[in-house]
Image (spheres, rainbow, N blue to C red):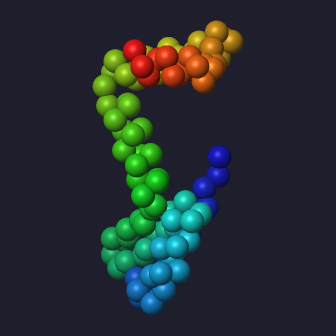
Amino acid sequence: MTVNISATSVSDFRKNFKSYADDVSDLNEPLIITRPKQKNVILISEQEYNSLKETNYLLATSANRKALQTSLNQIDRGQGHILTPEEWENLQND
């Protein structure tokens, strides 16, 4: 997976905020805003932010990390099961 990361200066970012914000939101690609003394910041879309927060939550405990790794190993061994829409609905109702 490749991620394109663009960069711009603070002054250019200020001048073209709407365009940069639209690009980050529409393309879901981060933007580095360069600042003096290596104090750069990165602008990301809300979707990307929420994805990072969810990943952080899922990996926050060793129990979750272990359960996720077990599931990935099962899939790698061909032991996974794809739920049908009905099975998914039943799980949600339990």
Count of marks overlaid on the render? 0
User: Which quadrant is the C terminus positioned in?
Assistant: top left
Residue in front for this viewpoint, 86 or 78? 86
Residue located at (56% from left, 16% from top): 87
Residue closest to the far right = 78
Q: Is residue 9 visible?
A: no
User: In this picture, is 84 found above or below 8?
Assistant: above
Q: Residue 47: give x, y in percent of width and height.
A: 46, 54
Residue 15, image quadrant: bottom left
Q: Residue 11: give x, y in percent of width and height.
A: 41, 88
Residue located at (51% from left, 22% from top): 89
Residue located at (37% from left, 68% from top): 41
Q: Residue 43: give x, y in percent of width and height.
A: 42, 66
User: In this picture, is 40 found above or below 28?
Assistant: below
User: In this picture, is 40 found above or below 74?
Assistant: below
User: In this picture, is 19 found above or below 58?
Assistant: below
Using residue 56 as the reference point, say whether residue 78 is left or right of it. Answer: right
Residue in front for this viewpoint, 90 or 72? 90
Q: Is residue 41 visible?
A: yes
Residue 37, image quadrant: bottom left
Q: Residue 40: give x, y in percent of width and height.
A: 38, 70
